[in-house]
Image (cartoon, rainbow, N blue to C red):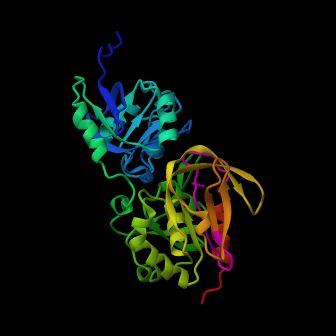
Amino acid sequence: MQAAQKSPRPTACLVLADGTIFYGYGFGATGQTVAELCFNTAMTGYQEIMTDPSYAGQVVTFTFPHIGNTGVTAEDDESQQGVAAGMVVKWDPTEPSNWRATADLTEWMTRQGRIGIGGIDTRRLTRAIRQLGAPHVALAHDPEGNFDIDALLQQARDWSGLEGRDLAREVSCTQSYRWDQMLWAWPDGYATQTAPLHKVVALDFGAKRNILRSLASAGCDVTVLPATATAEEVLALNPDGVFLSNGPGDPAATGEYAVPMIKGVLAADLPVFGICLGHQMLALALGAKTVKMNHGHHGANHPVKNHATGKVEITSMNHGFTVDSQSLPAGVTETHISLFDGSNCGIRLADKPVFSVQYHPEASPGPQDSHYLFEDFTKAMAARVPA
């Protein structure tokens, strides 16, 4: 069979708010979208990244050129559907070559309604993001190659951005549910938790499935509540501990309703564990501040120093906001820092089993250096003496 001929003209374009235009070849859904542009340095896990609710409102530039080579499988979805607005890649997605693949990336992107653009100089684009900050962009895909550049540029310039936006409410569940699926393991895949030791309430600000699986594998009976749940609703379930999930958007905006809930949980003297957005909002509840980063941290190879052990952990990260370490109040200890830029990556209360980290210890995608945090959480619950 003769290979399909590529169109002689570009079928997709990426328009930055400063007027820079990148032309390439589109794949996946057609149409256009407006979002913040970030880059991710992970070498694997493009499907997990595209389905991570933390990427709501963002188009992801993948610095690794071989995207699509392992195909896709429903087992690797981190949520029910694609969440990231689109993807930018150097080379067009390749045919899948993996025994677990059930479909190819292009087909998956079309089904998910996500736009992709290939044939882009991702090195140049990544340098621009690092130097100028995460830009607002319009991404368009038209098989005929017809683009209204002036209109796309105006859309990028008019987009309000992520600061001040509460996106957690948009990606959170709408009603509570139980979770008992454990981590994937050869040869049977996902097992079911049948003998839990600890009752955990997980607040869903955009929770990834592998975080919930990690909790279940650590011996937790997990009940997931919507982002807008109150402290009274959390405590009514009589949990042994409370988990604050990852999620998208501005923590200060989500914190308008989440911080009062967290303060109520803290007053009950329960063990609390937060990740990413949950980390940021725990810090807000304790009196600290959060700030927007220049281009954020996105990848599966970020070195973090653990002050307690002196060890360096290679971690998976995805955040565009960070906790201002200079604003941490007395009684709150900084436990981890990024070795890329010194930004805060973890906190702990000095006198209570309350802690959180900025990165993703569930390793999906990413290394498992920090998986001990789930064990720390269960140990804190086991040591708790009920009131």
Q: Give 322 or 40, whichever is nearer the viewer.
A: 322
Instruction: Give the x, y percent position of residue 148.
Output: 21, 31
Furthest-right residue in this view: 310
Furthest-top residue in this view: 2
Instruction: Give the x, y percent position of residue 78.
Output: 45, 50
Answer with left or right where residue 303 lies relative to residue 115: right
The answer to which quarter of the image holds residue 331 is bottom right
Question: Up-down: is 43 above or below 384?
Answer: above
Q: Give 25 or 289, whichever is nearer the viewer.
A: 289
* Residue under the point 36% across and 51% down: 161
Q: Give 95 or 356, whichever is nearer the viewer.
A: 356
Answer with left or right where residue 52 lies relative to residue 383: left
The answer to which quarter of the image holds residue 299 is top right
Instruction: Give the x, y percent position of residue 126.
Output: 50, 35
* Residue under the point 65% across and 70% down: 348
The magenta span reads 348-370
* Residue under the point 58% across and 48% down: 316
| Residue 181 in sight from this viewpoint | no
